[in-house]
């Protein structure tokens, strides 16, 4: 391959240092970052490479050999403890040669003041001498670092702030004996361009600025160097007359006393470049073939300065290995938001942690490719675009509960684990609920405003006591239970509605579980919500629900905005049918002007707070430590405890299990949504038999399938989004779910699939004879028929389906074909459909025109149908008929499954329900959302 000098880069300048800790600290204070470290303990030296790497940096994000403007610090072991060791800085006679490094800054005066305030010494301050536009600060070894401005001096004289992210390592200065020879060498041999010349005849010297890349900025403002915005330049300083002195020579820094070592050029093809240098008849300090280090070379310039030649690894990778072992840098963690010091302390021992707050979306996207872990709170949006740019990313950690700011689906597809901290905020949220309850009960907010206004309104502000009142809790998860335990100390009566609540935990917390929300609302003196915002909980407390409550009742919400109809609540407060409310979360945050949320906040009977449920020092500390511990686990090759995009599947299992994981999760979701809706709520069960048939029965582990089922069952209604292989069994136990896994080697060779899954829900935890039978027979063979009593109402009650809430067998069966999941049986009905998107499940009597009737009904409601499948009764159930009837009606009952576009709005659902009630042959239409179509949860509550 040929070599092209236009692709070369002035990569770095090497300085020997006495104490690397102090030196690295200094250059990091200048805004640089340690981008690479090459340790060589056998030879007893380490190399530290620092450069500007903010999103505003010229070489930001590049591999270290594809950069310009790097400073290499070389530390020989032991010098830091040697009191006699001293560096030659290149500016003292008789050892002058290297002159200085130079950084260009945004606001020159502010930058120099910052350095002075930090206690660093200056060789020359701005106020010294005649040249007021340059300063020289001294690094810990006495090397000079010139500081110049990127803007005119008068433009920045009143600026008090400086942004190190805008700084550049502008140039390296070398003194040369013969300017003509040196310019010819660097232009002809090294391929650099002469970008700028500064002649100072009155002072007897010229300055020449050379480099690669773009030419100087001819449009630079007056008083500003045309090259001030660049990095990686070489300044050659020529003092007149030195070329005429035969004995004159500069110190190259490598003879004693040592200091400066070399400059380095990264080339497109190392072998070809060295061949070219050979043709140019350069003087070699080390050829590629010399010594043990076969992928570096050193040429000498006319003054004997060393120029290292290395391969630009972005352009070409060399097979030969360096004698200096390449240090694999520690995993890098990006933290663009505030994380507690204790959390950071867990990371810094093993990882390179970089805190970069205030990043824009584009800045985050541009730098994320360098990091293995990303820790965020709620402000940073981790979009699909960001994730696709994150080539090294292994984990996104959300320091909180809600992950609505993370594209979990994209992360999962890219194999990036998303973790959160579901427990860190529990106590904070529970305490805030109690705080709002007491504030509402005792008119605290109103009283505070009143007395501050100079009033003394004790009679008007009389409140109520919590003791003896009924606290009604919707959602008895971790936060709900904690609220209950605190409220129990007030002597309150505790009731709750949660179909998944653990009865033992409820009893231990003195909570009485009620069978329905309606029963709960009628008894509530205080109502508190602790559920996620999903399709079934959106607007769950609306006008109809509020009308059933006591006029003295008070409502609390420290969970999710959107579960309470804000307009309906305002009306109830105005009418006096609800006594008050304590609200921490709203439909829009922050609320828009004149929105329902803003009107609710302004209501005199409302105590409102700006989403403060997790805003305690302890909660912030807890979630920070929690997610940092999980990041350590994941980057150490272990499993996390709170992976949101679960289940985690080992790579060797993934190909075989993945489609079945998808199938069984959707079966669980379908079960929960089908049997926990208002129509079938009483029939919901928590004991399940799951049978794997065919090749699945031969797997060594079914943990991913078990986890997928638990996730599917709970995701539509649970506050526990992070269900995975690690915690699935624990979560199931906590939620009172019992799953019995069985394997059957039933022959499925005659079927269009290799494996089959049956999910059967039992009415009790004791194995029924039917359940036992189901383990030994094919899921497609006949079932024992379930006879239903004949209705005693009027003769025409095909309006009640033959499967009653408690006596029917609840079965869902499915298989995978061509990696696509199919449901083949739902309840007593057989039919094949793909469980995805939004489904309408219509139970009806199959008759002429029924498809047209339902299609017309949905069309009027503005719902577009994508596909439709009619599922008749399973063969065994068809023999029984409906309501004991025989003849032509015995097999007319059916399910109509319709896939529709998008979300079915509440208005459309109301229209459908109204029309459904007028129909004598349509029982009900249930809306089911599968495969990520549920509403997005709002952070940060469990």
Image (cartoon, rainbow, N blue to C red):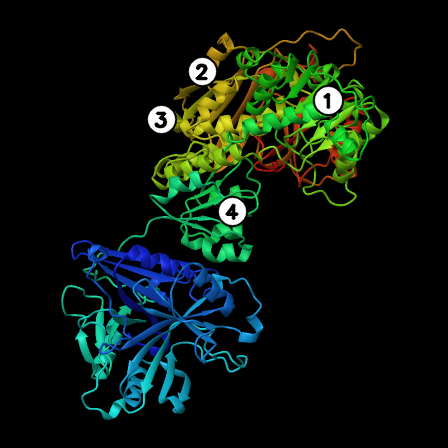
- 3D distance between C-alphas at marks 2 and 3: 16 Å
Question: Which residue is denoted by mark 4 in the rendering?
Answer: 337
Q: Is residue 725 above or below residue 338?
A: above
Q: From the top left corner, tell me how far across and down residue 88 is, in percent.
A: 24, 70
First of labels 2, 3 by sequence position: 3
Position of 157 with respect to 54 (left or right) is right
First of labels 3, 4 by sequence position: 4
Which-is-in-front pick, marks 4 and 1?
1
Position of 305 with respect to 583 (left or right) is left
Position of 127 with respect to 254 (left or right) is right
Q: Nearer the viewer, residue 656 or 45?
A: 45
Q: From the top left corner, tell me how far across and down residue 333 is, in percent.
A: 41, 48
Question: Which residue is denoted by mark 1 in the rendering?
Answer: 441
Q: Secondary structure at mark 1?
A: helix
- 3D distance between C-alphas at marks 4 and 1: 37 Å
Look at 36% across and 46% down and name the residue there.
Answer: 351
Residue 698: give its label.
3
First of labels 2, 1 by sequence position: 1
Dot 3 and dot 4 residues touching (CB under 8 Å):
no
Which part of the image, by quadrant, shows the C terminus? top right
Whether residue 243 is visible: yes
Q: Nearer the viewer, residue 288 or 111?
A: 111
Dot 2 and dot 3 residues touching (CB under 8 Å):
no
First of labels 1, 3 by sequence position: 1
Q: Is residue 532 above or below residue 779?
A: below
- 3D distance between C-alphas at marks 3 and 4: 47 Å
- 3D distance between C-alphas at marks 2 and 4: 53 Å
Q: From the top left corner, tell me how far across and down residue 347 is, in percent.
A: 38, 42
Q: Secondary structure at mark 3?
A: helix
Q: Secondary structure at mark 4?
A: loop
Which part of the image, by quadrant, shows the N terminus? bottom left
- Neighbor class of circle 2 (other Cα within 10 Å; few <14, some 14-19, many 20+) is some
């Amino acid at each position: 391959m040929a070599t092209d000098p236009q692709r070369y880069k002035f990569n770095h300048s090497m300085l020997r240092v006495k104490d690397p800790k102090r030196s690295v600290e200094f250059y990091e204070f200048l805004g640089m970052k340690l981008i690479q470290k090459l340790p060589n303990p056998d030879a007893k030296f380490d190399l530290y490479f620092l450069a500007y790497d903010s999103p505003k940096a010229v070489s930001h994000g590049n591999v270290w050999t594809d950069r310009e403007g790097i400073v290499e610090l070389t530390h020989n072991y032991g010098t830091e403890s040697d009191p006699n060791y001293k560096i030659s800085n290149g500016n003292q006679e008789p050892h002058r040669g290297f002159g200085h490094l130079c950084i260009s800054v945004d606001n020159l005066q502010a930058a120099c003041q910052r350095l002075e305030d930090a206690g660093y010494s200056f060789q020359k301050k701005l106020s010294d001498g005649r040249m007021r536009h340059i300063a020289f600060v001294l690094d810990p070894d006495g090397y000079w670092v010139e500081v110049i401005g990127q803007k005119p001096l008068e433009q920045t004289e009143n600026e008090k702030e400086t942004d190190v992210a805008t700084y550049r390592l502008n140039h390296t200065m070398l003194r040369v004996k013969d300017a003509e020879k040196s310019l010819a060498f660097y232009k002809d041999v090294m391929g650099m361009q002469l970008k700028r010349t500064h002649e100072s005849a009155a002072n007897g010297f010229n300055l020449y600025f050379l480099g690669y890349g773009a030419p100087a900025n001819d449009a630079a403002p007056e008083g500003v160097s045309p090259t001030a915005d660049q990095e990686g330049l070489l300044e050659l300083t020529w003092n007149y007359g030195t070329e005429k002195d035969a004995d004159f020579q500069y110190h190259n820094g490598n003879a004693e006393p040592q200091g400066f070592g070399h400059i380095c050029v990264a080339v497109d093809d190392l072998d070809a470049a060295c061949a070219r240098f050979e043709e140019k008849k350069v003087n070699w300090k080390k050829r590629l073939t010399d010594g043990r280090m076969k992928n570096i070379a050193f040429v000498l310039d006319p003054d004997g300065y060393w120029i290292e030649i290395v391969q630009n690894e972005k352009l070409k990778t060399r097979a030969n290995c360096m004698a200096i072992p390449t240090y694999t840098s520690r995993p890098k963690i990006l933290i663009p938001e505030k994380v507690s010091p204790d959390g950071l302390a867990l990371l810094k021992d093993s990882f390179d942690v970089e805190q970069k707050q205030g990043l824009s979306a584009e800045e985050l996207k541009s730098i994320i490719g360098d990091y293995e872990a990303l820790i965020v709170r709620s402000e940073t949006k981790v979009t699909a675009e960001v994730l696709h740019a994150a080539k090294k990313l292994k984990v996104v950690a959300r320091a909180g509960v809600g992950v609505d700011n993370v594209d979990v689906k994209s992360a999962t597809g890219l194999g990036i684990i998303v973790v959160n901290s579901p427990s860190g905020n529990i106590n904070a949220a529970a305490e805030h609920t109690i705080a709002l309850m007491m504030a509402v009960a005792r008119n605290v907010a109103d009283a505070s405003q009143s007395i501050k206004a100079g009033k003394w309104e004790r009679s008007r502000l009389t409140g109520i006591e919590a003791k003896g009142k009924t606290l009604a809790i919707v959602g008895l998860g971790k936060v709900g239970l904690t609220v209950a335990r605190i409220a129990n100390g007030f002597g309150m009566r505790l009731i709750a509605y949660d179909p998944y609540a653990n009865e033992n935990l409820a009893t231990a917390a003195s909570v009485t579980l009620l069978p329905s929300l309606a029963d709960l609302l009628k008894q509530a003196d205080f109502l508190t919500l602790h559920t996620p915002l999903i399709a079934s909980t959106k607007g769950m407390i609306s006008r109809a629900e509020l009308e059933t409550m006591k006029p003295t009742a008070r409502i609390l919400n420290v969970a999710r905005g959107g579960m309470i109809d804000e307009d309906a609540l305002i009306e109830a407060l105005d009418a006096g049918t609800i006594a008050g409310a304590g609200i921490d979360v709203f439909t829009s945050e922050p609320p828009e002007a004149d929105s329902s949320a803003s009107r609710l906040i302004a209501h005199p009977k409302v105590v409102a707070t700006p989403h403060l449920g997790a805003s305690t020092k302890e909660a912030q500390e807890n979630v920070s430590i929690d997610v940092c511990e999980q990041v350590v686990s994941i980057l150490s090759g272990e499993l996390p405890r709170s992976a949101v995009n679960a289940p985690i599947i080992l790579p060797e299992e993934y190909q075989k299990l993945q489609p079945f994981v998808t199938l069984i999760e959707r079966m669980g979701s379908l079960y929960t949504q089908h049997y926990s809706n208002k129509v079938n709520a009483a029939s919901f069960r928590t004991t399940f038999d799951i049978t794997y048939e065919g090749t699945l029965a031969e797997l060594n582990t079914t943990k991913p399938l078990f986890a997928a089922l638990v996730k599917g069952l709970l995701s539509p209604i649970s506050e526990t989004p992070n269900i995975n292989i690690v915690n699935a069994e624990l979560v199931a136990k906590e939620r009172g779910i019992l799953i019995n896994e069985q394997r059957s080697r039933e022959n499925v060779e005659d079927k269009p699939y290799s494996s089959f899954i049956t999910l059967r829900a039992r009415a009790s935890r004791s194995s029924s004879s039917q359940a036992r039978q189901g383990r030994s027979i094919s899921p497609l063979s006949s079932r024992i028929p379930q006879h239903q009593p004949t209705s005693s109402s009027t003769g025409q009650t095909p309006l009640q389906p033959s499967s009653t809430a408690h006596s029917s067998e609840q079965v869902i069966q499915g298989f995978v074909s061509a990696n696509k999941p199919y449901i083949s049986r739902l309840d007593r009905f057989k039919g094949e459909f793909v469980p995805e998107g939004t489904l309408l499940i219509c139970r009806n009597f199959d008759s002429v025109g029924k498809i047209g009737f339902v299609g017309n009904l949905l069309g009027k409601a503005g719902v577009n149908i994508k596909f439709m499948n009619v599922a008749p009764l399973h063969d065994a159930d068809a023999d029984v008929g409906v309501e004991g009837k025989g003849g032509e009606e015995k097999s007319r009952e059916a399910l109509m499954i319709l896939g529709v576009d998008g979300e079915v709005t509440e208005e459309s659902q109301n229209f459908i329900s109204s029309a459904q009630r007028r129909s004598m042959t349509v029982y009900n239409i249930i809306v089911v959302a599968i495969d990520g179509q549920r509403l997005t949860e709002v952070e940060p509550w469990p």
